[in-house]
Structure formats: structure tokens, C-alpha cells
Amino acid sequence: MNIQYFDNAVSLSHKAAELVLIEIQQMPQALICAATGNSPSKLYRELANYSELLKGVRIIPLDEWIGLETTEGTCHAYIEQHILEPWMISSDRYFQFYTEVSDIEKECQRIQTYLKKEGPIDICILGMGKNGHLGFNEPAEELKLKCHVAKLADQSQEHSMIKSIHSKPTKGLTLGMNDILSAKKIIVLVVGEGKKESTEQLLSGRISNQYPATWLWHHGNVECLIVK
């Protein structure tokens, strides 16, 4: 794991954008797994300045909430606003997750089939949660390897994306740890308050299911960018 420290989220995002663009120059049609939330927002805004280079890439979400009554706060709405429109990504290059289906397990299977056919992920952009989660891979006795329905931790239910929503979702659809670790390159952004303990656990190098981000030590090509 290549660990770099930055004074603020702006400089971190600038470096992250450089790393993404290096990969895109080699792979103009790269499959990018996109996390949502505050951590990668500045990165996506920075990359929008290079939309001509990025319009050929393919986008797959990292996760999606289950049970939101409106499109407000969905990962799809976020990706549409921060990635698809500013990067000029056509709809055929975006693989959307659908959680309002009668059989959510079939949706998980559909996602796995897509990854088997179109993957592996070329660039996986991650943020780390306060409890060390990656996507909705929450701390647990056993972590799931493939796409699955996850029970959300209390901290995840207070996420800024759904802060204003009265009826909080209690479950989420997420790629599994093996889906993430199968990516050719991983860029994890450690930004925001309340992450001191999970950051310490990550940097310790000790792999623990109670801090899912520590699983990134299993991967040989991880860029870990941290705001001091």
C-alpha cells in the first residue's frame, strides 16, 4: 500500500485525479467503480475538467441504498450529478443498480454476471467510513465476498447523503470484498472527521473484519491518500 498524506481535501483530490488520469491514458474505456459521498466529491469535480479524456470510461457504482422512498439521496442521483453529466458519460456506459425490485438476490446475481463479463474493475475509487467500512461492507464477524444485501450500521444510517431523510434505510446493496480486491488498481480516500481510530487501524497493517478497510492490505496496488 502506497500511503501519502495531504494538508487538505483539495490537494488530496488533485493527486487522486492525477492517479486516475494516468490509468485512463492507458485504458480509455476503463471500468471505474465509483464510491459516493463527501470523500470523492472534490475528486470527481477535478476530473470533470478532463471530460474529453473520460467520456469513454464505464462506470459501476460501489453500492446503493435499499428502501429510499424518493430518488433524493440515492447513489444513482449522486453519480448522475457528480459523474455522468459533468464527465459526459453516455447511458450505455453506466451500469445502474436497481434496488426497487421484487427479488433483490436476482439483482445481486445480475451485478455479478456483469462483473464477470465486463470486469474486472480497472480503477476502484473508495472512501473509508468512520467505522472502517468500504461501501456497505460493514464490520462483522465474517465479511461477504460478492455482491450482497447488507444490514447498515448505525453510523451508516446517519450518512450525510441521507441526513435530511426522515425514514432512514436500514439495508444497502453493495459490491463484496472480493469484487473490490479484484480491481486492478484501488484508490482509497481518507477524508473527513471522526476517522482517527479507523485510520490507525488501517495503518497498523493488521487485517481485521471489524475494520473492513484493513482488507486492502491483501491487494498489491493500492494508493491510500489521507488528509492529516
Image: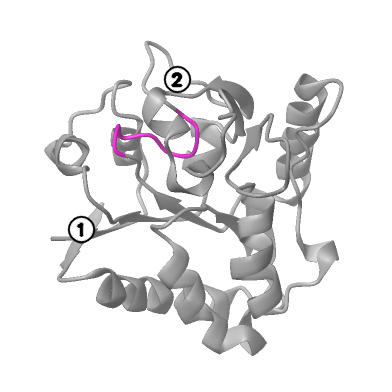
The one of 89 and 31 positioned closer to us in this rendering = 89
The one of 34 and 119 positioned closer to us in this rendering = 34
Report, in whole angstroms, how far the alpha carbon at label 2 lies from the one at label 1.
24 Å
* Residue 21 in view here: no
Q: Quadrant of residue 43?
A: bottom left
Q: Is residue 30 left or right of residue 160?
A: right
Query: Of the residues shown, which amino acid type is indicated by label 2?
Result: Leu
Q: State the image coordinates of residue 57 (x, y, percent, origin top left).
A: 68, 70
Query: Of the residues shown, which amino acid type is indicated by label 1?
Result: Ile
Q: Quadrant of residue 67?
A: top right
Q: How many marks?
A: 2
Q: Decide whether residue 135 is among the magenta residues.
A: yes
Q: Is residue 114 left or right of residue 198?
A: right
Q: Decide whether residue 194 is among the magenta residues.
A: no
Q: State the image coordinates of residue 19 (x, y, percent, origin top left).
A: 40, 73
Q: State the image coordinates of residue 53 (x, y, percent, origin top left).
A: 62, 85
Other residues around mark 1 within 10 Å, as few (<14) / some (14–19) / many (≥20) = few
Identify the magenta region.
Answer: 130-137
Q: Check disc 1 and report the residue beneath it.
A: 3
* Residue 181 in view here: yes
Q: Check disc 2 and report the residue beneath it.
A: 143
Q: Residue at x 62, y 84 (%)?
A: 51
Q: From the viewer's perspective, is residue 3 above or below residue 152? A: below
